[in-house]
């Protein structure tokens, strides 16, 4: 009886290890390869890459529009612009693509969307334009950090 009990624990321990390892393999490195410029290439299907780059261009349009409004003193235009780049913008991502993104990439990406929601909230409290600009420039450290570490490449469809 005692030995069976020990065996049960051992099996549970091994299973927990296998599950933890599986979760690590799936979640942490994502689907990546080294790239020629020293960054990590995230390997995506062509359509997935196009979609991510489209989202990126939208982020750039967002920070452009917010800067323009802040320079003109139009803080009241900021909440709606920032909200459109918030967590709601990340809602439709396919689980298959999410699984290919390294954990750090997902954390930075979702952190950026959350930061736009936070920016929308703070801009709605009628702050000085320069305060909003300072907060947005902090958010943009996520853009530069991620671009410094990652690029996108199209995966080999035979993989
Ligand atoms: C989680 C990572 C990550 C974050 C955060 C991020 N980007 Fe990107 N972005 C990328 C990657 C990867 C590429 C592709 C770069 C490459 O392949 O050389 C890219 C490409 C772009 C491009 C080029 C789009 C195209 O059509 O080629 C723009 C513009 C851009 N990002 C803007 C932004 C802005 C603005 C922010 C912040 C508000 C931002 N990105 C935040 C990862 C990120």
Image: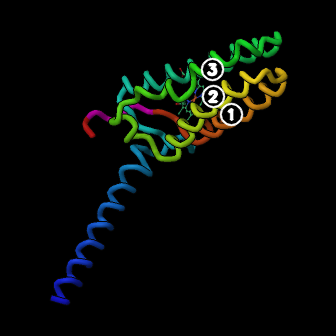
Q: Point out the stretch of residues depicted in magenta.
A: 153-157
Cβ atoms under marks 3 and 2 closer than 8 Å: no
Residue labelled 1 has its Cβ within 8 Å of some atom of ligand 1: yes
Residue labelled 3 has its Cβ within 8 Å of some atom of ligand 1: yes
Q: Earlier in the sequence, mark 3 or mark 2?
A: 3
User: Residue 70 in magenta?
Assistant: no
**Within the displayed image, which quadrant is ligand 1 positioned in?**
top right
**For mark 2, what is the residue?**
116
Outermost residue, bottom direction? Answer: 2
Quarter occupied by residue 131: top right
Disc 3 residue crowd, few under 14, some 14–19, many 20+, Cα 10 Å? few
**Residue drawn at the location 36% of the way across and 61% of the way down:** 20
Cβ atoms under marks 1 and 2 closer than 8 Å: yes
Q: Earlier in the sequence, mark 1 or mark 2?
A: 2
**For mark 1, what is the residue?**
139
Q: Is residue 123 above or below residue 37?
A: above
Magenta segment, prevailing SS (helix, strand or loop): loop
Asked whether, in this view, residue 142 is left or right of residue 56, the answer is: right
Quadrant occupied by the N terminus: bottom left
Disc 1 residue crowd, few under 14, some 14–19, many 20+, Cα 10 Å? some
Disc 2 residue crowd, few under 14, some 14–19, many 20+, Cα 10 Å? many
**For mark 3, what is the residue?**
60
**Residue drawn at the location 48% of the way across and 39% of the way down:** 41
Asked whether, in this view, residue 150 is left or right of residue 23, the answer is: right
How many discs mark residues in the rendered view?
Answer: 3
Q: Percent from the top left, x then y, of residue 45? A: 35, 30
């Amino acid at each position: 009886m005692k030995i069976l009990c020990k065996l049960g624990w051992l099996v549970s321990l091994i299973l927990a290890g296998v599950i933890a390892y599986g979760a690590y393999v799936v979640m942490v490195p994502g689907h990546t390869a080294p790239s020629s410029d020293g960054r990590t290439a995230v390997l995506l299907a062509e359509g997935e890459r196009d979609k991510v780059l489209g989202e990126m261009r939208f982020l750039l349009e967002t920070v452009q529009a917010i800067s323009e409004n802040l320079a003109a003193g139009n803080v009241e235009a900021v909440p709606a612009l920032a909200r459109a780049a918030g967590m709601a913008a990340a809602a439709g991502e396919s689980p298959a693509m999410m699984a290919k993104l390294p954990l750090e990439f997902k954390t930075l990406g979702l952190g950026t969307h959350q930061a736009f929601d936070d920016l929308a909230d703070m801009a709605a409290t009628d702050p000085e334009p320069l305060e909003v600009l300072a907060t947005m420039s902090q958010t943009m450290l996520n853009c530069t950090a991620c671009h410094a570490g990652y690029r996108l490449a199209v995966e080999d469809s035979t993989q």
